[in-house]
Amino acid sequence: MSLTQLHAPATAVERPKFRAWPELNNPAAWLVALILVIMPLIANGFFLIEIFGTTLILGIIALSLMFLAGYGGMVSLMQLTIAGFAGYMVAVFGVSGNANISLGWPWWLATPMALVLATIFGTLGGALAVRTEGIYTIMITLAIGAAFYYFTNQNWAIFNGHTGINTVATPQFWSVDWRSDIPFYYLILGVAALCYFAVQYVSRAPFGLALRGVRDNPRRMAALGFNVNAHRVAAYAFASFIAGLGGVLQVWNYRQISPGSVGVERCIDILIIAVVGGITRPVGPFIGALIFVILRTFALDVLIKFGLDGNRFRLLIGLGFLAIVFWSSDGVIGLWERWRSRHARAPSSTAGRGHG
Amino acid sequence: MDSVAHRLSAVGAGAALELRGVTRLFGALAALTDVTMTVRPGERRAVLGSNGAGKTTLFNCITGDFLPSSGTIRFFGEDVTRFPPYERIRRGLRRTYQISALFPGLTVQDNVYLACRGVSRGRFSFLRPGANDALMHATETLVQAVHLTPVKDQRVAELAHGQQRQLEIALALAGAPRFILFDEPAAGLSPAERLELIEILTSLPAHIGYIIIEHDMDVALRVVESVTMMHNGRVFKEGLPREIESDPEVQELYLGGGHE
């Protein structure tokens, strides 16, 4: 094609890409939002917290991985460790049943402290991890996760060894017990929505755009004037803050934290959640978390009915993970998008656009 | 950032790019040996040589993708030998790649926007640019300058080869370039596209100098005022385009005698 031919009138539809919020004109997104908001009318306490609350919390932690892996190309297995660290810090600085360890700070002081420390922790881990690429990033973040697990097991002065810290106090203000089912659900939903929109927004801001540039071609980014490693570390800092938020909600949810909450297999669960859901869009981790939580909760009964050990639910998750990796490397989101584009092809045959 | 001292030293030095004894070893192999070269501000020069002559290694040393094993590189008087690439880019150096090095998952507009953002403030900005963002305007202008406006919202992976080459050049023109390294910009272009490329190169503002690596002599010798001939990692000959073209040794080595 001659370059001069390109002066022909534009065929592509002009649209303000930078400011676009695709959700706002998507009826399905509005429907999901509506259902989530009126959920307490539909679901009882068990479903509200054990299924949807837990899904959103795991979704937030997996979202931090999605941000790093999907936009930055960095697969970090320490996101749950960062969340767990935040959880431990809430227990250590706040009020708990272990009065010899907890400092007894009020929640509004202990929580920001936990978030700041978790962000620092994750940023330092990230600063180590960005010196490596690909499988070595996975190894080094896994090593950080494993080291933290064994450290909490053996340290009694701060982390109270393998028994962990119990009866962690949860916030109560405006004469509301924020750990009672309905307020806690809305608290989780609010934080999850905030994280979701923050990731969505930042992905189209200069920082997120540059991060995707670093993912696609780090050498070229350096040749455009970007300090690639500084960008990667900043991405870890942002993701650590999100993971920290998830960790605070997690410890309020269970009211206790122990090494079992930060084990290596939990770290891998987060990876599975993100990959099954899809790491190309921020909604993916939440879908992955819903599938994971439903399987974890109900596969037990189903398996026992078939005369199998209930703990085999991981087998189902593993098989699902294999199937997803085989048939849709971009997760459930990818399946859904391909299905939709196949059905949308009939009216208009526009090529697949970038997502945002 | 640009300190006064840095500005003054740049004024005093006179050379845009000054290489002194630059050597680059890969194990026992010397890709560059004792390369010394001075390019004036605004000067346009071709670097010629057969495959393996060390041309792209030379570019990689200048941009900082590789550090030279020995020797010094000064950019507008400032010793940048040990600078990371991004520090050199922020001082006005640019380059294009022989094989397009773009961001295939991003749109044309986002590619150019990144290039504009890379050499300005706010690289870490968490705020989306507004409608009146200066860099958005710079992006629009640049996209228009390389005739890619009709495809600005398309992902780069969907572009034709010639369009990707145009985009390569656009990325190198972002901000305020003072010196550009073009690595075979005509590779894979059709004759018509080559004409367009020549037009873009010759219409660059006079203060922007460049070095161009190009195998197509019709392109290379029409857009430069001086030529450096490289062979086996060494500077073999320097001169005006017509001197190099008619030099019997050069013809023997590179043009294969039968040229024209």
Image (cartoon, rainbow, N blue to C red):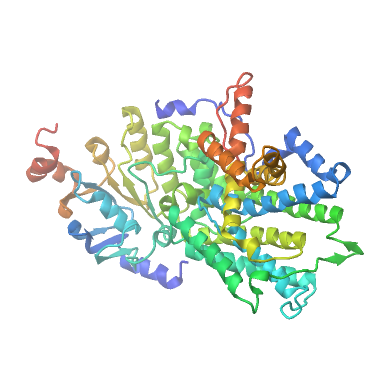
Q: Position of residue B3 (x, y in %)?
A: 46, 70
Q: Position of residue B193 (x, y in %)?
A: 36, 31
Give the quadrant of the C terminus of chain B: top left
Judged left or right of residue A198, residue B97 is left
Q: Looking at the image, which residue is at 82% across and 66% down?
A: A171
Is B151 drawn above or below residue A102 in the view shown? above
Q: Residue furthest front?
A: A307
Q: Residue A295 occupies which quadrant of the picture?
A: top right
Whether residue A93 sits left or right of residue A326 in the image: it is right
At 47% across and 66% down in the image, what residue appears? B1
At a point 78% along the width and 73% down the height, the residue shown is A97
Number of callouts: 0
Of residue B260 and residue B232, the one placed in the foreground of this image is: B232
Q: Is residue A115 visible?
A: no
Q: Is residue A5 above or below residue A236?
A: above
Front-lying residue, A186 or B56: A186
Q: Nearer the viewer, residue B82 or A355?
A: A355
Q: Residue at x 19, y 46 (%)?
A: B49
Farthest residue to the right: give it.
A175
User: Which of A271 and B85 lies nearest the eye of the viewer?
Assistant: A271
Residue B106, horizontal then vertical, whole percent: 52, 41
Q: Look at the picture and state if A260 lies above or below A185.
A: below
Q: Where is residue A9 drawn, in percent x and y?
A: 54, 26
**Above or below A352: residue B68:** below
Say whether residue A237 is visible: yes
